[in-house]
Image (spheres, helix red, strand yellow):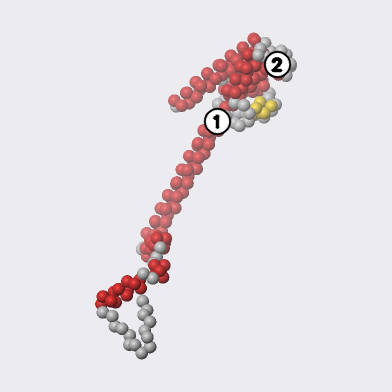
Amino acid sequence: MRARLADGVPPLTPDGDQARRWAQLELRDPAYAAAQPTPLDRVARAVQEFFTGLFRGSPDAALGLWLAVAVAVVLVALIVIAVVFSRRGRLSRRSAPAAAELFGDVETRSASALRRAAASALARADWSEAVVLRFRALARGLLERGAVEPVPGATVHAFARAAGHVLPDLADALDAAAGAFDDVRYLRRPGTAALYAQVADADDRAQAASVRVQAVENAR
């Protein structure tokens, strides 16, 4: 703390207590507080001292430490990549695609939604619509379960043959259901209760068979 002295007045010589009070007043100046290191400055200094200590040691020890850190980083990255791809693979097999081409048309409805639509058509006694929707539900359900890979442009009978390879016990039923769909959808023959029963039976059996296959896979 600087004291202004009048001209001709000799400077004061403070005693110990007075000097201490002056020092305390001087240190209260905001300029001194601004000069103190911030917490960020202390962290940066600590990091600097850590790395300086590493390089002050043996070169072989520092090199070994860096190699260990690099190996650990690479291992963690590989584990993360493996987990991500494994999870993505499981999701791709179990999740329904947002849209799938089914026999010339893009279908965005799920198998459950298609079955509900078929039930509504059945309640109206619209057998043709019920047959078409129920077979689409059958095909969509197999796609959702990953039992059959979607092939753009595949015919209904090609789809039934592919599904029959996965579910050989249902090969005949799937072929009959495909024939019913083909008759109604493309040959414009009227749907009947018998044709709908063929398709619904194949769909019900395919659902049950896919559940058993999944249970066997989980047990392995």
* Badge 2 vs badge 1, beta-carbon distance below 8 Å: no
Rendered position, 65 above or below 216: below
Q: Which mark is residue 95?
A: 1
The three-letter code of the residue at mark 1 reads Ser
Q: CA distance from mark 2 to mark 1?
A: 30 Å
- Is residue 160 visible to the viewer in this orientation of the structure? no
The three-letter code of the residue at mark 2 reads Val
The total of numbered circles placed on residues is 2
Residue that extends furthest to the front in the rendered view of this protein? 6
Crowd class of label 2 (few under 14; some 14 to 19; many from 20; radius 10 Å): some
Closer to the chain start, of discs 2 and 1, is: 1
In the image, what residue occupies the spot 58% across and 18% down? 203
Rendered position, 86 above or below 101: below
- Is residue 9 visible to the viewer in this orientation of the structure? yes
Residue that label 2 marks: 184
Rendered position, 182 above or below 107: above
Q: Percent position (x, y) of residue 111?
A: 59, 23
Q: For the C terminus, which image quadrant?
A: top left
Crowd class of label 1 (few under 14; some 14 to 19; many from 20; radius 10 Å): few
- Quadrant in the rendering for residue 161: top right
In the image, what residue occupies the spot 42% across and 60% down? 40
In the image, what residue occupies the spot 37% across and 59% down? 61
Left/right placement of residue 177 relative to residue 145 reads right
Q: Percent position (x, y) of residue 76?
A: 45, 46
